[in-house]
Structure formats: C-alpha cells, structure tokens
Image (cartoon, rainbow, N blue to C red):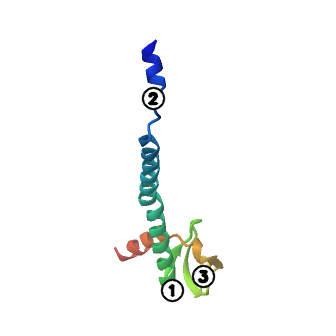
Amino acid sequence: MDFILLASSGQPQQGAGNSFFIMIALMLIVMYFFMIRPQVKKNKQQQEFREQLGKGDKVITTGGIHGKITEVRDTTFVIETEGGGKLRIEKSGISMEASAALKTGDKS
C-alpha cells in the first residue's frame, strides 16, 4: 500500500511537454520538405513552362485536346485543332507533362 501512495504522490514529469512540442515541430518540418516544397516547385515550373509557350507550339490540354497555338493573350491561348476549329483555352489548362512528351515525341 505504501508503494502505491509513493508512486501517485510524485511530481509530474516536466520533460514530457517539451518532447511533445519537439515532435510536432519535426512533423511540420518533414511535411514541409516532403509535401509543400515539392508542390511549390512544381507550380513554379508549370508557370515558367506556360510563359515560354508561343505561337506555333503544339500543346495538349489537361482535358486531352491536342492543338497548335495560333494566338497568345494575357491569360488565354487560342489553339487550332485538327479539323481547323479554334478554341480559346486558359493558360492554366495546358498540361506541362503531356505537352513536353509531345515535343520529345516530335524530335525522335
């Protein structure tokens, strides 16, 4: 009985609170380097890719539409499709991965 009283009457541990905050901080740092930072880097690459596109470039939209850029505006492209139709597409609707694969496919 004396053992139970001695164990329960002890002071609470002070180090437990500090290690909790350290673990939370480490989790946030890991999440930043494995999730947030790569996404920001990818978004920056996509923005640079879209800025470099110009008249005559062949592109594929995120919806899978293939076309050739005929006009460049501030936030949109006008692309000509195979049947001669023209579509106005937002610059954010151009797929960087598919368009880059299209360009490498043309060179080989």
Q: Measured from the top left, where is residue 28 in percent x and y? A: 46, 55
Query: Is residue 42 among what the camera can see?
Result: yes
SS of the residue under disc 2:
loop
Mark 1 vs mark 3, CA separation in Å: 9 Å
Q: Which dot marks residue 77?
A: 3
Q: Measured from the top left, where is residue 30 in percent x and y? A: 42, 54
Task: From the viewer's perspective, tell me whether residue 91 is left or right of residue 31.
Answer: right
Q: Measured from the top left, where is residue 15 in percent x and y? A: 41, 42
The answer to which image quadrant residue 81 occupies is: bottom right
Mark 3 or mark 2: name the one nearer the start of the chain.
2
Return the residue at label 1: 54
Q: Which dot marks residue 13?
A: none
The answer to which image quadrant residue 79 occupies is: bottom right
What amino acid type is highlighted by mark number 3?
A: Phe
Callout 1: few (<14), some (14-19), or many (20+) C-alpha neighbours within 10 Å? Answer: some
User: In the image, is residue 28 above or below residue 107?
Assistant: above
Callout 2: few (<14), some (14-19), or many (20+) C-alpha neighbours within 10 Å? Answer: few
Return the residue at label 2: 10
Mark 1 or mark 3: name the one nearer the start of the chain.
1
What amino acid type is highlighted by mark number 2?
A: Gly
Residue at (56% x, 66% y) in the render: 64
SS of the residue under disc 3:
strand
What amino acid type is highlighted by mark number 1?
A: Gly
Mark 2 vs mark 1, CA separation in Å: 73 Å
Image depth: mark 3 or mark 2 in front: 2
Closest to the observer, 63 or 44? 44
Closest to the observer, 68 or 94? 94
Q: Measured from the top left, where is residue 78 in percent x and y? A: 62, 82
